[in-house]
Amino acid sequence: MPGLLRAPRRSRGLAALTAADCYEPENLHALADGLGTAAVALLVPALDEHLDSPQRRDALLDVLGVLPSDEAFRALLKRRSDPHVSGELMGAMKRFPVRAVRELAAEGGTDLLDGHVRGNLDVIKAALPLLPEDARAAVEQITEDLGATTDADPADLPAVLADPPWARKRERLEPVVIKGLSAPEPSVAWAEDGRDTRCEWALPVPHGWSRHGEVRGPWEGRIADFEAGRLRSAEQVALLCLAPVEQVRHLVAGWYVPKDGYGTHQEPERWVPRIAERFGPDALTVVLKAARSRPSDCGHVVVPYAAEPAAELVAGWLLRGGAGSSHAEAWMRRHGPQAVRLLLPAAFGKPGKRRDAAEYALHFLARELGRDRVVQTARELRGEVGDALALVLDRDADDLVPRKIPEIGPFADPAVLPRVRLADGGRALPATAVRHLLTVLAMSPPDDPDPGLRAVRDACDGESLAAFAWALFERWRLFGERSEDAWALTAVGWFGDDDAARRLTPAIRAWPGENGHHKAVKGLDVLALIGTETSLMLLDGIAHKAPFKAIKKRAEEKIQEVAARLGLTGEQLADRLVPGIGLDADGSMTIDYGPRRFVVGFDEQLKPFVADEDGRRRAALPKPGAKDDHDLAPAAHAAFTQFKKDVRTTMPNQVRRLELAMVTGRRWTPREFATLLVHHPLMWHIVRRLVWLAETETGTGAQRETAVTAFRLAEDRTFADAADDTLRPPDGARIGVAHPLSLGDTLTTWSEVFADYEIIQPFSQLGRDVHRLTGEECRAVRLERFENLTAPWGKVVGLERRGWRRGTPMDNGTERWISRPVPGGLHVVVELDPGIQVGWGDGNDDQVLRTVWLADEPGDHHAWKSGSEHRFAELDEVTASEVLADLRSIT
């Protein structure tokens, strides 16, 4: 270990050193040099003490990792769950491969042993006679498995793995520069449906600018303040969005909202669409700056603008990919031949990124419009331009794509990772192809995968790809989870399966508490990328229940993105994601041990139980015995263990969803009700324990009435009324969970029916407490009966499980309100005092409910304003009852 073991700078003897001195680097190396194995007794306690101190921890690990000592290696091995230690352990395994085999086999570290043997095969084979019997047997088994798979011929591999474009030398032709080209004058082409300027955000009106809900002048004074720089950013935006257009048009050109600490510049999606709609071409500067800073949120606003700066921006998006690429494609299609004219000056200008982007965009337009039409458009400008463009389009567009080939870290060693088989199941990718595969994965962020990924999935066995991706992810974690190598996590999204989704979910839930919010966010992207029903179900579970608010919110956004892509609402998607978790169509499951079988059902608490074939219940599923089938029984027992885990994960979420459906008045069509609920093997066990309503509208106009029929589901899945007579709702009916207030006088009858059948409901429905507003409260704009009452902060936060949403943290991280959306687009808002401090946990104080009122939106202002005019009579009786129940439950 030259250079590592040097004498201490201090003139102290080794005998005088104590554990407290161990973190000093000069003392560490002296210990390693002078005491050898005995140093571990001092180094290891010091390591445990200073694991949270980066400088001291790293110094200790540096020495433990190079000590040629079994004790030092074991110390690292026992602490491998810590990502900092695991990275050093990987280095020690590479440094001492034979020792690693011996210690891993003795410790039972099979999760590391297989890959280690693969990566150091020649050295370990040479040392085989020197290994203990258990280690030798393990190595021989691994080498035998390796010999069973042969390498595939390069000719049978997808091109991206056999001859990837980044591995070739590219020859670039001398660029043709044409001077004197100019772009057409800017213009705007709006979409007919108004989607370009659609904005779902309500614009906050500055204090004092409105009276009785109407925004008024004097505008001249505010314009003068704008020009003199006396208006804050939010007031500048409000002036441009609210004042008469012709009075403020001269203020827009060249303007962009200043960064003055009010955060308006951070949310351009709230106001830029309005500016664009009001001022058209004059707002080009505003639109471009907003789109450049927030392409995902504001990129759509630049699509109507046919202007040279807009062409340059979207061409760059198209070339680089990412959040703006879809808007770039929309811009190209919107403007067609005009887009060609706007791109030509850059395409034949000075060589560089701007020219490359323009050329790449012209290749895109040639595919969209046809090569001849694009060339003819250029030729109409000047003949030589058309000829030069024809030559550009003859070249490969891929040569223009900037490729920064990532460096693959030591964690991604092809020799260590499981082998990827071709789809025929026999031959495997050779090491060079695996290196190319790792490069493809490293160049594939979630929103911009390399095109070669599809070819890899088509050519290779899915199961082996999933195992490869999961092993890659685990090695990334073992090597310390470096952010620059986080593409290994994304790889699970590209190749992972249901098992990977299940194993990843606990890590996603835990990461925010380990200062790993960014990893958790990326993990949510991975669940969405896997895209199976199970992975999306797990994502939906995080969206409904997660210990960390930011991750819960991000999961909700991901679910909404997936739902929008499928043309569904979030709840409609959730309906379609409920897994059958191995149940048969009738809602049961058979566990087959060969000579004996068991039937799985659900008890009154919706917990699974096991019964013999004769129906006698057992306390638990017995373990496979000597007389059971040696193949069937263990697999069946493992399947039931996974089934119980899936029930614990899935069932509470589904019960909660149906209770929320009752509270919010959600409805299903008869077909949806039958397919997604009644005949679903898992949901059946919940829905048969509830009372349902079928609503049918009759008449038209003022004569329209709603007929309501209550029913339950009988054992044979038919519909039965309170008298147990069979009924069939009309095809046009809307079906929902009955709220007790909707049952009226029949509530008592239904309660008796369920008592007679001894049906225990999954949540309080028939026995639910109902509450009503007083006549005075209906006429009021505030709910004063709850104002100035105190509630424990934990109960306030607990309202999230009932559909309430915590407010946006203010500047000091305090959430000063909580709100609940209600029908009609309104929100019940509760002002909290002193507010909930984000991240304080039990350090929060009890909360005083200062004001309770109805608002158009929660907004960024938590205080009630006297101008609020929504009265509580606008709430229907079910919503009012649930709001009152929620507030009563916390006070």
Image (cartoon, rainbow, N blue to C red):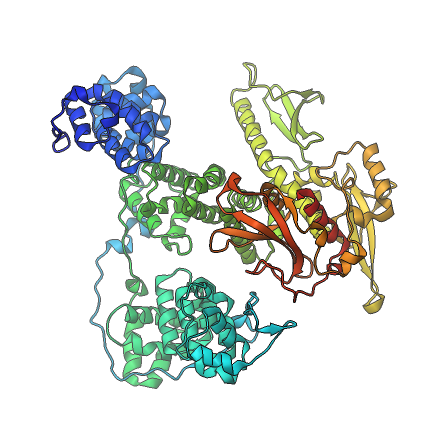
Please tell me in which quadrant of the rendered image residue 619 appears. Answer: top right
Towards the viewer: 247 or 863: 863
Residue 231 placement (x, y as % from top left): 46, 73
Towards the viewer: 495 or 686: 686
Residue 248 placement (x, y as % from top left): 49, 82
> In the figure, 635 relative to 153: above or below?
above
Q: Is residue 787 left or right of residue 437?
A: right
Q: Is residue 567 left or right of residue 6?
A: right
Please tell me in which quadrant of the rendered image residue 757 appears. Answer: top right
Q: Is residue 451 left or right of residue 579?
A: left
Residue 49 placement (x, y as % from top left): 32, 28
Towards the viewer: 673 or 842: 842
> In the figure, 64 relative to 660: above or below?
above
Residue 476 placement (x, y as % from top left): 34, 39
Please tell me in which quadrant of the rendered image residue 114 appears. Answer: top left
Q: Is residue 832 left or right of residue 300?
A: right
Residue 885 in sight here: yes
> In the figure, 810 relative to 755: above or below?
below
Which residue occupies the extreme front position in the image?
788
